[in-house]
Image: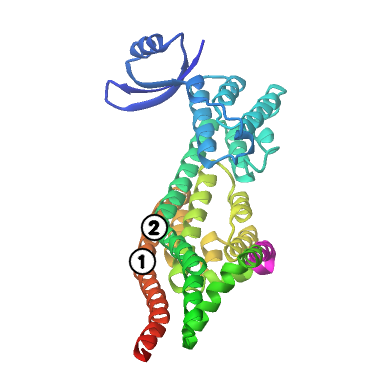
Amino acid sequence: MPFFFYKAKTIEGETESGAMEAKDEQVLARSLRKEGKFLVWSGTEKKRSKKNPLSFFKKISMLEKIMFTRNLGVMISAGVSLPKALDVLTAQAQLAKFKKIIQKIKEDVVKEESLSSSLKKHPVVFPSLFSNMILAGEESGSLVESLNVLTEQMEKQHDLKSKIKSALMYPIVIIVAMIGIGILMMVMVVPMIAETFEQLEVELPLATRGVMASGVLIANYWFLFLFFLLIFAFLMRFLLKREKGKIIKDKLFLKIPVVSNLIKKKNLAYICRTLGSLISSGVSLIKSLQLVSLSINNFFYKKAIEEAIEEVQKGTKLAESLEKHEYLFSSLVVQMIQVGEETGETASLLNKLAEFYEQETVNITKNLSTLIEPILMLIIGAAVGFFAISIIQPIYSMLETM
């Protein structure tokens, strides 16, 4: 029988999600009605699965992992055995690469390996943060709860990234269009104008000669510019992978006035969300901090967390250890963690802090986008004005001579 995922309404009007085996949709609806629920939506793994011959070469997206985690939690809570649930998720996966990984995890589970240990064999797809939260759920007997926490965390991270990308999309499009139009002008228009001035033997001002020379150079030797651009991109990528290059980049971003605020809020949102999720899943504070330090990208926040781990291991409170890094951790974060440590509500307060800083990150990104727009207009206006003056000035000089 096919396996159905469904959404149903209870008599009280609440929406519930679940999974159930049934002959068809009508049988599923009747089964739910016996439980006092009314079917709203249903779908099988066959309907959701679409074959794509190129899918093996694609990167496994966050959405794929969210669907995997959410549906695994739903099926286990519905009483489906882990191997059967993984079988269904294998058929449901969109990418051939992901199908293969889930199938290997299922084979390990059948051999009586734990889910967490089988996930650890695929660190690129399921990082240590993921597998350790599953391990905590297995040890505490709350695997479904750990899966739900993981799903919520990934959804929040994906939502935040989507909002940031959406807010920055307009200025990025404008910048790309501006560069593209500028290159086309320099390659196609400027050489024609330069040739005309050369035939007329007009004496050109310095600015015009510079524009003409640049246009001719780009038109004739564009491949060299492309080559040097690729070399520059390769060198930048190489340097940023080195520790010194990463330190310089992170330090620079923390110094730029508007960008530094965005970087701080984004890192605080991630730290609070991840730490809160780990603690609420039953992971110890030390282990949670170690996992956060491994997963965070910013060098200075990573270093601060590593120092906090050493302090906490010596018996110092987390709030006190973070207070020493007031440039990175705001007084609000320190005070809320201090209250959480005193009341035993550290996880819930960290989650509230995460929501606050996630919203702050989105607001700053929108404001940054709004600030960039007039700056771009000024740059475009200045570039167009300079180009126009450089071209028109010798024409006026020629007309005066005539």
Name the residue furthest right: 111
Name the residue furthest bottom: 401
Left or right of 335? Residue 90 is right
Query: Mark 2: few, some, or many residues within 10 Å (few <14, many ≥20)?
Result: some
Is 83 in front, or is 210? 210
Residue at which label 2 appears: 170
Is 339 in front, or is 111? 111
**Number of numbered discs on residues:** 2
Give SS at disc 1.
helix
Query: Which residues, given as a range, are shown in magenta?
Result: 231-246
Residue at which label 1 appears: 373
- Taking the spot 39% from the left edge, 71% from the top edge, the residue there is 380
- Taking the spot 51% from the left edge, 45% from the top edge, the residue there is 277
Left or right of 354? Residue 101 is right
State the image coordinates of residue 339 (x, y, percent, origin top left): 43, 57
**Magenta-drawn stretch contains 236:** yes
